[in-house]
Image: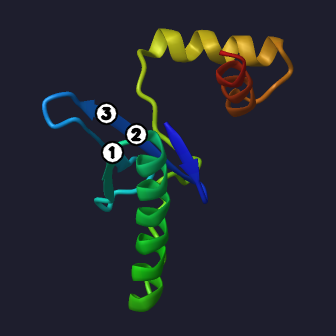
Amino acid sequence: MLNYKGYTGHIEFDDEAGLFHGEVVDTKDVVTFQGRSVDEIVQAFRDSVDDYLEFCAERGEKPDKPFSGKFVLRMNPELHHAIHLKAIKAGKSLNKWVNDTLQSA
């Protein structure tokens, strides 16, 4: 995984083509890149992110960042009740308890 300007690139190697290829995974938009060496793939990733940000600016659009910090989680009612009780025992809101638990995982 590569990181640049808040974006993450996922890389795979195609042994038949002898080529690294990747995709930026932090956006719903399709942003891809490729290279034949580590240096090339890193530069291609950075260039693709820069091109994406420039493209968005030219169009007057905000770059896509699909993570709002909120997500809906479905679970059975018994588990919901059990973690609610754990949160109360810990003196925390359910949200804080889940955040803390996930952070330590």
Q: CA distance from mark 1 to mark 2?
A: 5 Å
Residue located at (45% from left, 16% from top): 77
Q: Is residue 43 toward the left or the right of residue 14 in the image?
A: right
Q: Is residue 12 toward the left or the right of residue 66 in the image?
A: left
**Residue 94 versus residue 60 in the image, above or below:** above
Residue type at mark 3: give it: Glu
**Contact, CB < 8 Å: mark 3 with mark 2?**
yes
Q: Which element type, helix, strand or loop, lies under badge 1?
A: strand
Q: Which residue is mark 2?
A: 10
Residue 2: image location, x then y, percent: 52, 42
Residue located at (70% from left, 12% from top): 85
Residue type at mark 1: give it: Gly
**Residue 69 versus residue 74 in the image, above or below:** below
Residue 7: image location, x then y, percent: 52, 53
Residue 12 - label: 3
Residue type at mark 2: give it: His
Q: Nearer the viewer, mark 3 or mark 2?
A: 3
Residue 12: image location, x then y, percent: 31, 33
Q: Which residue is mark 1?
A: 22
The colour scheme applied to this rendered structure is rainbow
